[in-house]
Amino acid sequence: MTGNATPSRMRKYLLFPELWIAAAALLWFVLFPDQLSFGTSVLVTAIFVMSLDLVLGYAGVVTLGHALFFGFGAYAAGLISIYGWNEPISVAVAASAVGATVALATGPFVLRLRELPLLMVTLALGAIAFEAANKATWLTGGDDGLVGIEFKPVLGLFEWTLSSDTAYVYAVCWLCVCLYIARRIVNSSFGLAVVGVRENFWRMALLGAPVQRHLLRIYVIGGALAALAGALSVETVRFVGLSVLSVDTSIAALVMLVVGGVGRLYGALIGTVAYMLVHHVAAQINPYHWMFVIGALLVAVVMYARGGLLGLAETLAASVTRVRGA
Amino acid sequence: MNADPVLSTRGLTKRFGTVVVADNIDFDLHAGERAALIGPNGAGKTSFVGLVSGTIRPDAGGVHLNGQDVTRLRSDHRVKAGLVRTFQITNLFNKLTVRQNLYLPVSERIGASNDIWSPAAGETAIIDEIDDILVRLGLIEDRHRTITELPYGRRRLLEIGIALSLRPKVLILDEPAAGLRAEDVILVLDVIGRLPAEMAMMMIEHDMQVVKRFASRVTVLVRGAVLMTGSPSEVMSADAVRAVYLGRAGHTRFHDSAHA
Amino acid sequence: MSDFAASLIFIVLYGLSFGMVLFAISIGLVITMGLMRVLNMAHGFFAALGAYVTVWLMFQQGAPLWLSVVVACVVVTLLSILIERTFFRHLYTAAQLDQVLLTIGLAFLGAAFLNLLFGPNPQPSTLPSSLAANVDLGIRTVQLYRLFIVVLGACLMLGLWWLFDKTDFGARVRAAVDNRRMAEAVGIDVDRLFAITFALGCCLAALGGAVGYAMLPPEPMYPFKYLVIILIVVALTGFGNIKSGAFIAASVGIVDTGARFLAPTYGSFVIYVFLIGMMVSRHLRMAEP
């Protein structure tokens, strides 16, 4: 019962994927010591995109408003630290609790919608949050955002440095933790039930499954992880701006997930890395040309490479083993 | 035979426009009973199953399950209450494997689906139960194949497997042998023959051989109304029933079965 | 009292004209979504292009407004036929997520393309003097342009009503929206119907964008900027429900304009809250385990 997180073929070679992620991250650390702040943002974003995969990839909830949780987590972390409590790990956990609460509050009606109404409501909720944050400058700093955010050293030992090495390692650890949690959930009986709801809603109901409850649960988990990512981004960058709640953020996460491969967890990681690397390199150029790239990517993935990069990699691996076996 | 029926309908009526698909149907099913519902095409057999299972709302009358009035209860709640039906048009989880298709109902039944942490692959009790059903249905070799890779006949078998895995108190089989190859029919009949004794079972069937083999009681439905109820031989030799099955095919089927 | 009446007229007229532009742009989407069941996030692009071509013709080529609008509609319609035959037809049987992704991708491509052609800045959106003139309604003066739009919107409504209620084509579209399989079974060429309807929808969007250029100035992010409010109208209208489309669009226009006018701080929220309320109450699935 893999829940489609890991094809059984590859499982032999992966064992503990968290170790591989940590190893790859270490490699980057060693090879590009001056690109650690970029690396950190990739790691944090990967957690966010992974949380979207749980909701959209596994549960099939097509939402354009996942940044709602990211934003709430970010602002929660920023505000908690400004108002006195700035121990990073506990702030991150508290922020994820905020995200879970928002998901718990919105889930019961959002999750009863499908197709266009679902898209609309998730978009609208995101828009409302964005507008609210925009207007409530006393709380959020509005356009200028929240500044002067400081956090205590991680575990009391590791100071936050300008070169972002603490932030980087901190983010790697959180990514490994989140990946492990996500993997356990996805491979559990609950994980399979969520996939069942996605694959055939009505049949699941006819099996006596509490479909709304299953959906709400995965939505809350996704919201919590997204909020955690939001908090981590604030802790590592020490700034929160309106963009954390914008539709652009939701869409960017969607693009990263799709490019990497939906519903496979690792697709979220691959997609984030690929997208952000290309964006980092091409960012200097005209932002509209960047939209050509995103647009072309989306069209190409939908029409030719439905499984994203992960799907392509698997097809490649399959054809290689076929050739070998022939 | 237990006194109180596990499933009973009283005055069940449904109209679609001017067409009466269910006409004041009274029906009882007791624990351990094997009943069959027969009738010509369009008699309202599948509609009756829909009314009983909750996918169709009746215009009048009621449905009781284990003494509880379930007339207003949604179909998925009736499943939880122990009433399961199979579908003629298979409605499975196409991208999942055979094993996963069976894992879902079992997991829901025992509440394992609330476990977000333990790996599903490690649930040996569930997997053993699934494999047991698969062996009985002859599907064990297919356990890792996805539904889209499965031929139609095996999908129908899996449908029955799913119904069984829910351990219903009342099982309704909608033409379980229809459209199956001979070797699959044998499997289905074997499974039906080995249903738990306490389970109440009702099947819609056209094949009189099957009816004669399993059913202790046969109800004949014509134009939405119950024509008669009785043992298979009573029903099949009744003139009124014969008259309804006009035409050489029906007549021959009856004739052969009654005198087999 | 006259203050109140003046405000009321402003809200109604300006809201209504905004609504009429929204109606023109959205109605095409209502029809194509109802007919083809495609969630098309790129619809705004056709409206944007309509606006761009119109403005370009008027300000760069000195063409009169009416001619610019006509040419814009023709150009966009032809382009839409090309796009439908190449990309969109693949979406008719695609999964919902695929539709969203592909059309968002097309919207990105569209925005990038507009920027390439016309640059990142909003285009001049001044009105020709004939329309910029003010009309004195006694209680307050309003722009002729706004009245023009409302009249145009009314004509459009009548035209569409005639098309869908009184013609053969309209009957076929309604049949296909109601029950595609049945329509095919009785011999309606649904494939061709889709192509024609899609072109019609995009033409209407272009018309909306073209005449509405002063209200919704052309800029590369146009497809995204107005996507939400267009989708709001579509979502509230329901698919294929053309008659209520005008009413809904008008309501949305008025509600949004009114809310922003009356309560500038919180006005922008109103339309979203309104949408969420409507969606939830209407679409709440009855069967929930």
Image (cartoon, coloured by chain):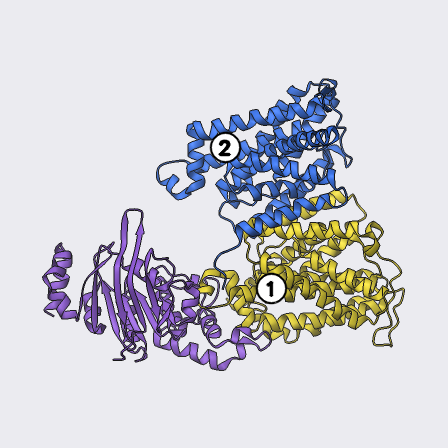
Chain colours: A yellow, B purple, C blue
Mark 2 and mark 1, same subunit? no
Q: Residues within 10 Å of mark 2 (few under 14, many from 20)?
A: some
Per the image, the residue denoted by label 2 is C196
Label 1: state its secondary structure.
loop
In screen coordinates, is B212 left or right of C102? left
Q: Which mark is residue B45?
A: none
Per the image, the residue denoted by label 1 is A264
Q: Amino acid at mark 1?
A: Arg
Q: Nearer the viewer, mark 2 or mark 1?
A: 2
In screen coordinates, is A10 left or right of C63? left
Count of marks, rendered view: 2
Q: Position of residue C93 (x, y in %)?
A: 49, 47
Quadrant for the C terminus of chain B in the image:
bottom left
Residue B145 figure quarter: bottom left
Q: Please report, as a chain letter, where disc 1 is located.
A: A
Q: Position of residue A260 (x, y in %)?
A: 64, 58
Q: Please report, as a chain letter, where disc 2 is located.
A: C
- On the question of residue A23 being in view, the answer is no
In screen coordinates, is C259 left or right of A83? left
Q: Establish if C268 lies above or below A156.
A: above
Q: Position of residue C188 (x, y in %)?
A: 39, 35
Q: Establish if A257 lies above or below A221.
A: above
Residue at image position (68%, 28%) is: C53
- On the question of residue C247 being in view, the answer is yes
Q: Establish if B179 lies above or below A169.
A: above
Residue at image position (34%, 57%) is: B58
Residue at image position (51%, 35%) is: C242
Label 2: state its secondary structure.
helix
Q: Amino acid at mark 2?
A: Ile
- Outermost residue, front side: C1
Q: Position of residue B66 (x, y in %)?
A: 35, 73
Residue at image position (17%, 71%) is: B231
